[in-house]
Image (cartoon, rainbow, N blue to C red):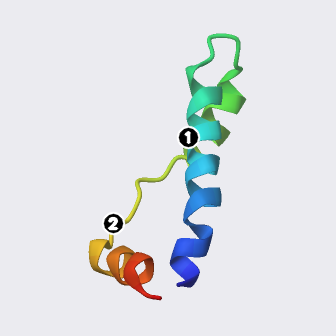
Amino acid sequence: MLDEIFNIPVRDSSHYGLSIFSKASSSEEQHEHSMQMVKAPVANAAQSEAITTRR
């Protein structure tokens, strides 16, 4: 359950980092720091299904 709670903020952080990296006006330092923010999501379909179907 805790993983699902933090799922959205983690995805938002990665999206923000990617948007900074994509800007041509970003400095090299900003590019380096922004790529540290981008992480691939860890999929756990069984856990997500259990949480969304639980009543």
Q: Is residue 10 above or below residue 54?
A: above
Which sits in the foreground, 22 or 27? Answer: 22
Mark 1: secondary structure: helix
Q: Residue at x 38, y 80 (%)?
A: 53
Q: Residue at x 62, y 48 (%)?
A: 12
Taking the view exactly as shown, the residue that stands out farthest to the left is 46
Give how far apart the Cα atoms at labels 1 and 2 are: 20 Å
Q: Is residue 8 above or below residue 14?
A: below
How far from the left and from the top, in percent, is residue 28? 66, 24
Where, by quadrant of the figure, is residue 44 drawn? bottom left
**51 sits left or right of 27 in the view:** left
Residues packed near mark 1 inside 10 Å, few (<14), some (14 to 19) or many (20 plus): some
Where, by quadrant of the figure, is residue 8 drawn? bottom right
Taking the view exactly as shown, the residue that stands out farthest to the top is 24
| Residue with the mark numbered 2 | 43
Q: Residue at x 63, y 17 (%)?
A: 23
Name the residue type under label 2. Ala
Residue 18, labelled with which disc?
Answer: none
How far from the left and from the top, in percent, is residue 39? 48, 53
Which sits in the foreground, 46 or 39? Answer: 46
Taking the view exactly as shown, the residue that stands out farthest to the bottom is 55
| Residue with the mark numbered 1 | 35
How far from the left and from the top, in percent, is residue 25? 70, 11
Name the residue type under label 1. Met
**1 sits left or right of 32 in the view:** left
Q: Is residue 30 above or below residue 41?
A: above
**14 sits left or right of 48 in the view:** right
